[in-house]
Every structure is written in structure tokens, then in C-alpha cells.
Amino acid sequence: MSEGYRKLSIDRFLFISAFGRDSDYPTEIYYQTAYLDLDNGEMLWVYENDEDAETEAGLDPEENRRDRERVVRDPDRFLDIPGLEHGDHHDILKRFLRSQWTEDEERRLRVEEAYFGSIGGWKKAVDDQDAIDAFYAFQDEAFRELAEEYLMELGIIPIWK
């Protein structure tokens, strides 16, 4: 391990859920930011509007306000988790389609040809649940690798829990 790196215990599922979100593809009505607490590795989701926290997630608006103020008071403690760009999601699907996820070449080509530039459209057109499941497993691993690279660039070695 290189000097300047530090280990941080982080919930893998929660971090990857935040990191793997499609950050530039508008799907959410309520604006929410995900943070990693660099002191203890905990994840924190903060709504921009306190009332949205209650409406969207059933969270106490006062708790959301307190969390938002914590981030503002100590910005060096909280890492704003960026999420991936929409194009990154397509790149991961394209990498999956070119991978050797199956030994059945005819099936692989059929699944690859179902992609026409839309991930949702591909899922509908492919009509192969095993291929979709294989893609999700491939995507999860790609998200983990990208997240680890990102954290390492910041001097953090994640200890996934």
C-alpha cells in the first residue's frame, strides 16, 4: 500500500448504489445528493428540499435539515459521490455484449444485435432473462471496479462490508 492511502470500511451495496446511479439522465423529481463520510465510512443521502425528504422517502424533514447542515459545516469530511455518466452505462453494456458471457456464439450474437442504443429497449428486445441477469452481474462488477478506481484516486482503499 502506498503512502498517503488510508483504509475506510464502506458498505459496498450503499456506495455502489450511489456511485452507479445515472447522474446525467433525468429520472428523479426530487434532487438528492449522496455523501460518503470520510471519518467513518457511513453513507448519507441528503435531499435539497427538506419536505421532499418526507414526501419521497418518508424521512423526517428535520433530520434531513440537520444532515444537510452537517455537510455544509464540515465539507472536507463528506465526499459528494458523483455517479456515472449516462454514456458510462452504455459503455458497460457494450463491453458486456463483446465479452464471452456465453459459449453459445449464436445466442451471444442474437443478444448483441438486440442493442440499438437504448438500454431499456435492449432489455425488452433481447427476450433472454439469463442474458439480462448475466449483464446485471457484469454491470455490478464494472461498478465495483470503477468505484474502487475512483476512491483510490482520492487516496482511499475501500474495505467493503
Image: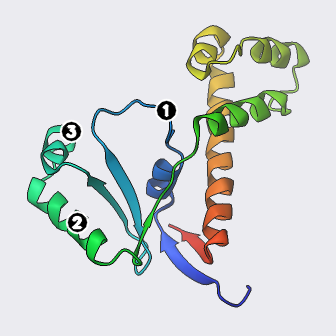
Q: Is residue 104 above or below residue 100?
A: above
The image quarter in which residue 140 lies = top right
Is 127 or 118 nearer to us in this picture? 118
**Which sits in the foreground, 133 or 59?**
59
Mark 1 or mark 3: name the one nearer the start of the chain: 1
User: In the rendered structure, which amino acid carries the disc numbered 3?
Assistant: Glu
Q: Residues within 10 Å of mark 2 (few under 14, many from 20)?
A: some
Residue 24 at x, y percent in the picture:
50, 38
Q: Quick check: 40 left or right of 98?
A: left
Q: Secondary structure at mark 3?
A: helix
Of callouts 1 and 2, the N-terminal one: 1
Q: With respect to residue 141, does 128 lie above or below?
A: above
- Which residue has dot 1 on it? 25
Instruction: Identify which residue is drawn at 72% across, 35% down.
Output: 91
Q: Which residue is mark 2?
A: 67
Q: CA distance from mark 1 to mark 2?
A: 26 Å
Whole-Å distance between the Cαs marked 3 and 2?
Answer: 16 Å
Q: Nearer the viewer, residue 14 or 83?
A: 83
Marks 2 and 1: in contact by CB < 8 Å? Answer: no
The mark lying in front, picked from 1 and 2, is 1
| Quadrant of the drawing holding the N terminus | bottom right
In the picture of the structure, the residue carrying the numbered disc 3 is 56
The kind of residue on which mark 2 rests is Asp
Question: Residue 154 at what x, y percent from top left?
Answer: 61, 73
